[in-house]
Image (cartoon, rainbow, N blue to C red):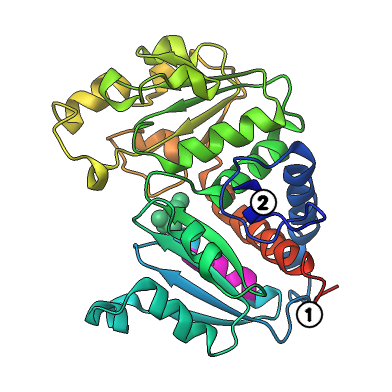
């Protein structure tokens, strides 16, 4: 996998997973994103880094934040962007994924940004596409959502400056979450003090400790002294059996409330990749409260995606 993502010089060619990437690469992404993050405040909010390049957004699953921030990021890098409407494309007439890719390649595109319900779809495209094309994983099944993890790391660094002293807790449906898997990998690479996961037993993967986390089934214990709280929604679309009694019961035991928040550090930040379900995993007043950085995460998604798109294109030496 590492070989697929990196070129011979060890630079990012594709961005498919955090797995196999080292601290230097993740820090470079954060640093480049920081240089882009001030752009919206400037009069000229475009740079010509990807002028003449064509980026194709291929979203086989719904998205609000990821798709639009990728589009905005590509536009700010001066690339041409095609967002394929999958429901109205030939895929809905039975065309295979590979045939769709071959046809888009024939239009001389330079990058695919792919979201797919099947884990490994981005890797499959990267293995089978033309060598000059970069592939970025915008979320594949339950496997990975690496650009979300990087915008989360960027947000944590923005508010907490360093990683090594932080207790981070991830609360919710860990079992079905590609976001949690990528977050845990990135937090481990960047060297936080402790990563905790909080969920009912039915929503934790087996041997979850092997991911480098400390599991809790009690939310107050998991929150105790935490500096960063990362909430997740229940991913009902990926649940194949009844893993929970009902949403009300879940909120009663695992919802983040004002009362429970008192267990965390007084300056803890509250994060959520979205979409949020108010009153299911998080009390509405907390989602909109002073410790919430949920909308800042969305803002940071543009700069992180600009950084990842420009770095993958630079690794091929055809942009400076
Ligand atoms: N966080 C996230 O992936 O949101 P979307 O599904 O709206 O892209």
Magenta stretch: give its range: 67-74
Q: Is residue 281 placed above or below 66 in the rendered structure?
A: above
Residue 291 can be seen in this image: no
- Residue 252, image x, y percentages: 24, 21
Lateral position of residue 82 relative to residue 276, left or right: right
x and y percentages locating residue 2 in the rendered image = 65, 47
Q: Locate residue 89: give its quadrant.
A: bottom left
Structural crowding at the residue carrying mark 2, measured as other residues with C-alpha within 10 Å and reported as few (<14), some (14–19) or many (≥20): few
Query: In the depicted view, which residue is nearer to us: 50 or 121?
Result: 121
Q: Residue sitting at 35 percent across and 13 percent down?
A: 217
Q: Which quarter of the rendered image does ligand 1 occupy?
A: bottom left
State which mark lies toward you, 1 or 2.
Answer: 2
Cα–Cα gap, marks 1 and 2: 29 Å
Residue 73 lies in the magenta-colored region: yes
> Is most of the magenta stretch helix, strand or loop?
helix
- What residue does disc 2 label? 3
User: In this view, which residue lies farthest toward the right?
Assistant: 320
- The mark found on residue 48 in the picture is 1
Q: Nearer the viewer, residue 72 or 315?
A: 315
Q: Quadrant of the C terminus?
A: bottom right
């Amino acid at each position: 996998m590492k070989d697929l993502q990196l070129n011979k010089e060890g630079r990012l060619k594709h961005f498919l997973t955090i797995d196999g990437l080292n601290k230097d690469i993740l820090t470079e992404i954060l640093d480049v994103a920081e240089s882009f993050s001030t752009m919206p405040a400037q009069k000229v909010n475009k740079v010509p880094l990807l002028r003449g390049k064509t980026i194709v957004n291929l979203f086989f699953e719904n998205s609000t934040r990821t798709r639009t921030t990728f589009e905005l990021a590509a536009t700010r890098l001066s690339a041409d962007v095609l967002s394929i409407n999958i429901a109205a494309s030939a895929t809905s007439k039975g065309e295979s994924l590979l045939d769709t890719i071959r046809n888009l390649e024939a239009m001389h595109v330079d990058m695919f940004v792919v979201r797919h319900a099947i884990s490994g779809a981005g890797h499959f495209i990267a293995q089978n596409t033309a060598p000059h094309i970069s592939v970025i994983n915008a979320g594949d099944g339950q496997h990975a959502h690496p650009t979300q993890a990087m915008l989360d790391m960027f947000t944590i660094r923005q508010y907490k400056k360093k990683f090594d002293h932080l207790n981070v807790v991830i609360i919710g449906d860990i079992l079905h979450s590609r976001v949690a898997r990528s977050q845990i990998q990135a937090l481990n690479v960047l060297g936080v003090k402790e990563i905790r996961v909080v969920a009912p037993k039915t929503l934790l993967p087996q041997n979850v400790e092997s991911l480098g986390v400390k599991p809790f089934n009690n939310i107050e214990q998991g929150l105790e002294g935490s500096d960063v709280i990362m909430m997740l929604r229940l991913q009902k679309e990926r649940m194949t059996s009844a893993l929970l009694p009902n949403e009300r019961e879940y909120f009663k035991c695992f919802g983040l409330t004002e009362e429970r928040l008192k267990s965390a550090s007084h300056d803890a930040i509250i994060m959520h990749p979205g979409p949020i379900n108010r009153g299911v995993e998080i009390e509405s007043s907390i989602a909109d409260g002073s410790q919430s950085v949920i909308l800042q995460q969305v803002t940071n998604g543009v700069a992180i995606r600009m950084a990842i798109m420009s770095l993958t294109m630079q690794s091929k030496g055809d942009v400076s």
